[in-house]
Every structure is written in structure tokens, then in C-alpha cells.
Image (tube, rainbow, N blue to C red):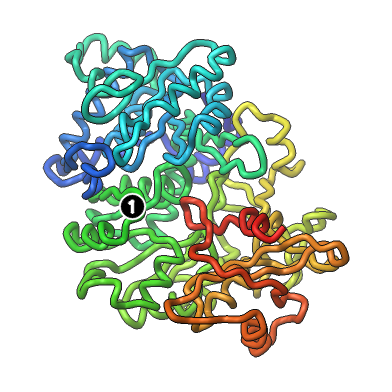
Amino acid sequence: MITTPQPLRQYYREQGFFAERKLHDLLYQTAVQKPGAVALVDPLNRQDLTGQDAVSLSYQELHDSIEQYSYGLMRAGLKKDDIVFVQLPNIVELVILYMACSRLGAIVSPVPMQYQKHELADILPILQPKIVVSLNTFKGKDQSSPMWHAIEHCHLQLDEKPAHFTIGNGQAEHGEPFDRLLEEPIDETLWRQYLADYPANADDIVTICWTSGTEGKPKGIPRSHNQWLTIGLATYEGNKLQDGEALLNPFPFINMASIGGLMMSWLYSAGKMVLHHPMDLAVFVQQLISEDISYTLAPPPLLNNIIKHPEMLPPNTLAKVHTIGSGSAPLDAWMVEGFKQQHNIEIVNHFGSNEGVSMVCGPDDTQHPEQRARLFPISNKLLETRLANPESCEIINEPGVSGELQIKGPAVFDGYYKAPQKTQQAFTTDGYFKTGDLFEIADADFYRFVGRCKDLIIRGGVNIAPAELDNLLGAHPAVEEAAAAGYPCDTMGERVAAFVVLKDDQELSLEALCEYLKERQIAMYKLPEKLVLLDAIPRNPLGKALRYKLSEMVS
């Protein structure tokens, strides 16, 4: 399946962005160069997750596993352009599936472990997968049933019932053991014939990831090998990674943050990738130390806590780490500065989306923590960017005026899967993708992130970006974490509410909070008119505050 028009593919090749390599090609090249080097390491606590022992694979072992599973999947009926629907945590089999589908010319479509029958049944009829893969159990609970029930629920909408494979010890409630794919030895003649009959192309779609779907049905986002590798090279270079580094991935392999931000960097660095799932600080710390990790990703709330509570980490936990990537929510300047001063670690600010937003602000862009936390270079070799008024669509060229970021380039997807109307709505007539992200021109070199178009609080006709308030609220000395959201008002349309998690033994009133904000000289209309104390801010798996849930609390 190729979605990028031929003239565009040719143009991106002429510009040096697109090439002929597939994802597995980079890995196989490393397997030839250093077959005995450690390539992939399971989560330290895999026994707790799936009931199985953690494994560590060398590049040769990983190569051989990919070949064996690729052949087994082919014998199970999977062929070029067929789809594998996957619901797995970060375990070695998930990475093997990505590379096996790359080898076969097939497509991986991953979804979060949190999805249940309702979400799975929304996606299955759209995908029409040939094969689905899930776990037997996850953390001791049955995990095969949600997928099975989803398949049964929408079987009349499926062209054919997909084969269901499960991973884990013992017999699952539903599905066949995934390792059954390894039972038949590779017939080299048959295998070579398949590869000759169905050659994979670097422009082929290799993944279909999904938006969160909080505004309705989820949207599928196809991406090709070339689109992923273009993103991967940018993050690899932006994070200043070197050959053979040890990378730790704590984000689920379901979207841009983890696939583009870490898996692709691993393929380029030819190093070791250590898997982690879900975020467990004790396990995370142990992996940082035992695996000599030099680069990782982490959500802003965790990084903030590390600076606020240095006692969280044993001595020398971060001794080998030189860079940490973060994003998915605005960063705090004091956190960026704290990591540099206390640990000599650079925090690199990533702003991305499944559709192809790929903006990075690192030490080469600016040494100032305030800029690193909120600004992104306007110059971007992967993206043509511009700002436009979300209502009038007029292009914005003057500093300080908020506008929607619009992008196009080799990293940008071509359109939503089987959704031409949504695709048409998402792109301008001259081919720019409308990101839904609000930025403003800070100066000649930088954009400043303002917030999400859909997250705006509109009070009396005046737009308020809650991300700005998040930073101000989070800097209060009594506050552990915070987020702002709007709530309905008959007279003003919306008003501002502050949702706060306090540090231990701290107190805070709405009056005291507003006095603190007034000292920061913010506009009066931005002051919160309700204060809600919580035990935790509801967030999605990537750490983004779920503002619609916050709004529901006070609506």
C-alpha cells in the first residue's frame, strides 16, 4: 500500500529525504556488522507483566527471530499489505512484529493496552486485519478476552475473521499461542519465492497508528518506511546520539513519541534498546543503572518530580545519561535548568504528532532554559511551516499573534486511513496539514507554543491557553502538579478552573493562589475562579492532561 503520490516520492528522493531502505534493513545491516552485540532487552519486570521471564537478544538472535516469525506469519496467511492488529505492552515480541511486518511488506497497527472491547470494536471494521495479536494475561488478569469479544461483536462487519494469536504462559482463554508460528522450519525455497513475488518497498505503508479518539471515532494514521526513517534521523541527530548507545524506552510503542522518538533512533544508532512498560519509577531507576542507559524519554511530570525531590533517585542513577527527551506537555524552564546544573543532562524538547509534526529544541538551538522549554526553531529541514488564523485562515507573519501551525514535508502523513472526508478537512487546499496546535512567532528564529486550538478556554470572547496557566500553577511552591481547564458559565461562556495536587503537608486556597498569580503579572481574566484539589491530574499514557475530564468535574 503506497499513499504518497509518485511526483512527491520522486521529489523527496531528489532532495535526499527518501531512499530505498526499509525498517528491518537498518537492523539487518547492524546484525552483519556486530552480530554479538546486545540489541534488545525485555522489561526487567516482564514476569509481573506477562508471567514470562525477561529475555535479552543479540543482533544475530534478533535477526533470526525476525526471520522465523516472518516466515511463520507468512505461512499463517499474512502477505504484503495485510494488516496485523496488535495490543501488546513493550516486550521483545512487539518489536519483532514491527520488523517482521517490515520484512513481509505487511502493516502493523498497534493500540494501547488500556483499550477494551468498545475501542477495539471501533477499529476492527476499519482495519479488516488478517491477524490480531494480544496477551494471554496482563498483570495477572485475562487479556485475550477483550480482543475476542470485540471480534465477535463486529464479526458481521468483517470480511473475514482474523486469526488470533496470544503471547504468554499457558493456554489463553481465546486465541492460539504466538510461538506456534515457530513450529515449522523455514523452507528456504518457499521463503525466497515469497520475497521475490512480494518485494517490500520503502514507500509502502508499514504502520497505522491511531489518534486518541476523545472527540469521536479514532482516526487511523498510515505511515511509510520512508516517513518513519525521515522522522527517525531528525530525532537521532537532534538528541545527539552516537553509535552503540543504550536507549531506554518507557513510552508504549503505539505512536510518534516512542516509534519516531526512540525506535527509529535505535535503528540509526545500532545500539541497545531497553524496554519498559508501564511507567514504574523503581523499575525505571533500576534499568537506568543496570543497563548503563545514556538516553531516554520521560514525561514532564516525572522530570519535574526528580528536580523537586532529588531523594527520589539513588546516587549515580543518572551518571551515564547525557540527554533526556521530553514533550507531550509544555516543559518548565526550572526543570530544564535543574537537570543541566545538577546532573549535566540536556533536556531536549520534542513536539510531535502521529500525523508528522516533528519539532525539536535542543542545546544546539538554544542554551537558555526559558527558550528550550517553550520555543521551537522556525527553520526545520523536514517541515515547511506557517501559522494561520484558525477562523479566517489568514497567514500570520507578525510576532506575538497566535495562529494554528500548518505543516507539509517528507515527514507528514498523506491522509487518514479510509477517511477521505476527514483527510480533506485536515489539509489546506495547497497541501498543508492543519495541526490544531497554536503557536506564535516569538522572534525571527523561534515559534512559541501557546496551546491546542481545541483546548482553548474562551472567557467573554477572549482566548486563554491553559498550557500557559499549567506552567504558572506548577511553579507554586505548594504545588506538586497542576492543570487548568474551562468550565461553562452562562454570562462569560467559560471561566477558568485550577486543578491542583498539593505537596505533602501543604495547603492552598483560591485566594492565595490568585495572589501568587497576580504577583506574576498575568492578565486578570486568566485568574482561576475555582480551585479543585486532586490526588492526581488525569492524564493519557503520554502524560498529557485530559482537560475534558477536568472540565467534567466542575461542569
Q: Secondary structure at mark 1?
A: strand
In the rendered image, residue 217, in percent from the top left (x then y), is placed at: 63, 35
Name the residue rendered at 34%, 66% in the picture.
323
In the image, what residue occupies the spot 33% across and 31% down?
135
- For this rendering, which residue is in front, 27 or 136? 136
Residue visible at 75% across and 66% down? 397
Q: Quadrant for residue 530, please give it.
A: bottom right
Outermost bottom residue:
519
In the rendered image, is residue 25 in sight?
no
Residue 15: tell me if it is visible.
yes
Percent of width and height locating residue 341: 35, 82
The quarter of the image holding the C terminus is bottom right
Residue 514 figure quarter: bottom right
Q: Residue sitting at 56 percent across and 66 percent down?
A: 377
Q: Which residue is mark 1?
A: 249
44 versus 505 height, above or below: above
Quadrant housing residue 73: top left
In the rendered image, the vertical position of residue 419 relative to residue 489, given as above or below: above
Give the percent coordinates (x, y) of residue 64: 19, 29
Q: Is residue 508 left or right of residue 62?
A: right
Q: Spot the residue most to the left.
A: 36
What amino acid type should be assigned to the residue bearing mark 1? Asn
Percent across and percent down for residue 548 are 65, 54
